[in-house]
Amino acid sequence: MSKETFKRTIVVTGGAGFIGSHVVRLFVNKYPDYKIINLDKLTYAGNLANLKDIEDKPNYLFVKGDICDESLVNNLFAEHKVDGVIHLAAESHVDRSIKDPFLFAKTNVLGTLNLLQVAKEYWKDDFSNKLFYHVSTDEVYGALEFDDTLFTEETSYDPHSPYSASKAASDHFVRAYHDTYGLPYVISNCSNNYGPYQFPEKLIPLFIHNIRNKKPLPVYGKGENVRDWLYVVDHARAIDMIFHKGRIAETYNIGGFNEWTNIDLIKVIIKTVDKHLGRPEGSSDSLITYVTDRAGHDLRYAIDATKIKNELGWEPSLQFEEGIEKTVKWYLDNQEWLDNVTSGDYQRYYEEMYTDR
Ligand code: NAD
Ligand code: TYD
């Protein structure tokens, strides 16, 4: 990192994870006059290989550390004169939260609280040009029925899983720091993301990996649950727009207007992977294996993204068919990345999860 003066200094937490790595890449490349500090603990989900292409850029710095570590975060703010935070670090997988809710409360709630407290103390004499951007999820709103309702920014919180409960609690703390201490914030709540660099415990990369390796595809329940899928690069673009143009103390929902039942989505993935591998159409259909449903499995998520469109002009740039093509191709072309993250700890975890069902 050079000694030159930067226009802004932003800490991105969780920048070595799936969405965080896309946000770091976008900001480092698009804003050479910003210093981007990636603070990441490198849990099982964090992987510096996700950022190989930008790691030598002069405006990028990686710091290995825990968002719960008060003195580390304090020192980071003081040493680098941080004026913005984009907070993505979290435990993010619902199935893991069912197994270990305490870890989710620690990272997602206490970790966020620690960041808020440090930012508030460091910025309190002058909140101008400071911003705490909290990246959250649509899962805080609970579950919709099979109808045409959508989650808006006004929908009441109703989280069901330990993951969504921990994210909801962290959202509340962010708003409380504004209302109590004046901390400037924005929050965005996004739908399910897909694309390159997603850890293969989540539906889409897991299934691409399993189809390629002719392993079972564990469909929870009847596969009827609905998710609203957004290409991860479009989420990063939305975060960029909200960070720069979003109104303080506002919430923005982000989604693709792109609802799929799990089973229909799985059929598209199977078809696309088989096509790329030169297998006859339908040859991997028999890998579909219906397993015991996830406890408290939310029926349907769907986002109304009208506010961000009307206020900031954001819209998804990719059609779903194009996004899935790109995603399948990326995982098949980056087998080494996939092999690295599917060895060791993950493999043991997955086998344990799978045997439990
Ligand atoms: P991820 O699990 O891929 O990455 C999380 C990152 O946080 C990892 O790099 C991990 O090492 C890091 N991390 C975890 N605990 C940490 C700690 N204590 N200190 C520092 N770093 C820590 O997650 P993701 O899918 O990229 O999600 C990022 C954020 O976006 C999360 O806050 C999540 O709630 C939110 N979100 C995700 C989705 C989605 O579909 N994946 C949708 C909406 C919102
Ligand atoms: P996931 O990718 O874990 O995201 P989330 O739970 O945050 O929505 O799961 C997406 C959907 O796919 C969800 O309804 C659960 C389902 N699912 C399966 O049916 N089988 C699987 O192996 C996984 C990981 C998920």
Image (tube, grey):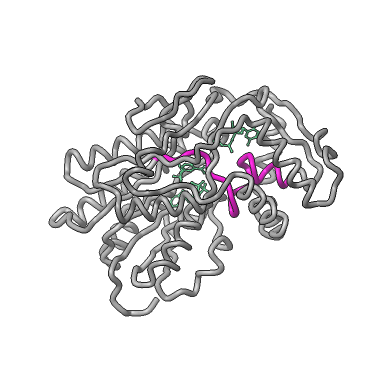
Q: Is residue 156 or residue 62 the one in the foreground?
A: 156
Left or right of residue 346: residue 170: left
| Number of marks drawn | 0
Write down the region rendered in magenta.
189-209
Q: Position of residue 183 (x, y in %)?
A: 21, 47
Q: Residue at x 41, y 50 (%)?
A: 238
Q: Residue at x 30, y 46 (%)?
A: 186
Q: Quadrant of the C terminus?
A: top right
Query: In the image, is residue 17 part of the stretch drawn in magenta?
Result: no
Q: Residue at x 81, y 43 (%)?
A: 214
Left or right of residue 275: residue 167: left
Q: Position of residue 122 (x, y in %)?
A: 21, 57
Q: Quadrant of the N terminus?
A: bottom left
Q: Would you place residue 165 above or below residue 6 in this image? A: above
Q: Can residue 106 be seen in this snapshot?
A: no
Q: Residue at x 24, y 47 (%)?
A: 248
Q: Position of residue 202 (x, y in %)?
A: 61, 41
Q: Would you place residue 160 above or below residue 61 in this image? A: above
Query: In the image, is residue 204 part of the stretch drawn in magenta?
Result: yes
Seen as rendered, the residue at the extreme bottom is 3
Q: Would you place residue 226 above or below residue 52 in this image? A: above
Q: Quadrant of ligand 2?
A: top right
Q: Is residue 339 or residue 235 the one in the foreground?
A: 235
Q: Would you place residue 58 above or below residue 27 in this image? A: below
Q: Can residue 59 be seen in this snapshot?
A: yes
